[in-house]
Amino acid sequence: KNRAGICRIGITVSKKTGNAVQRNRSKRIIRAAYSAVEESICGNWDFVFVARGKTKYLKSTDIQKVLTEQLLKAGAIKK
């Protein structure tokens, strides 16, 4: 939780995941998944998302399902 009054995100991708094109694709996929879930987040949070090696091969809808589950566990999304 934060006191900034807004939700903020940070996305990190290691160079081990591939070249610049693949790293940027991973970041775009995570950003798209977050934007689909963003409206259901209640409260002010700081999130840091870490892209893994398989992220570049997935679609944003796949990431969105996992993201929703994890945010439910964290208490950022209420059912």
Image (cartoon, rainbow, N blue to C red):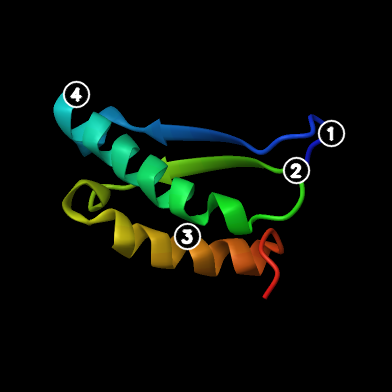
Report the side of 27 relative to 49 (left or right): left
Q: Tell me the quadrant of the picture where the N terminus can be found.
A: top right
Q: Position of residue 24 (x, y in %)?
A: 25, 30
The kind of residue tagged 3 is: Leu
Disc 4 vs disc 2: which is toward the camera?
A: 2
Tell me how far mark 3 sits from mark 2, CA to CA: 17 Å
- Numbered-mark total: 4
Please report contact status of discs 3 and 4: CB closer than 8 Å, yes or no. Answer: no
Q: Are marks 3 and 1 in contact (CB under 8 Å)?
A: no
Rounded to the nearest angstrom, the CA distance separating label 3 from label 1 is: 23 Å
Instruction: Give the labeled residue for mark 2.
Output: 44
The answer to whether mark 2 and mark 1 are in CB contact below 8 A is yes
The first of marks 3 and 1 along the sequence is 1
Whichever of callouts 3 and 2 sits on the residue coming sooner in the sequence is 2
Q: Which mark is residue 37?
A: none
Residue at 77% over, 50% down: 43
Query: Mark 4 — residue?
Result: 20
Task: Give coordinates of residue 2: x percent, y percent.
Answer: 79, 37
Please identify the quarter of the rendering in which residue 11 is found. top left
Q: Amino acid at mark 2?
A: Asn
Tell which residue pokes out farthest to the top in this image.
20
Whether residue 8 sits left or right of residue 43 in the image: it is: left
Towards the viewer: 52 or 3: 3
Q: Which mark is residue 3?
A: 1
Give residue 67's mark.
3
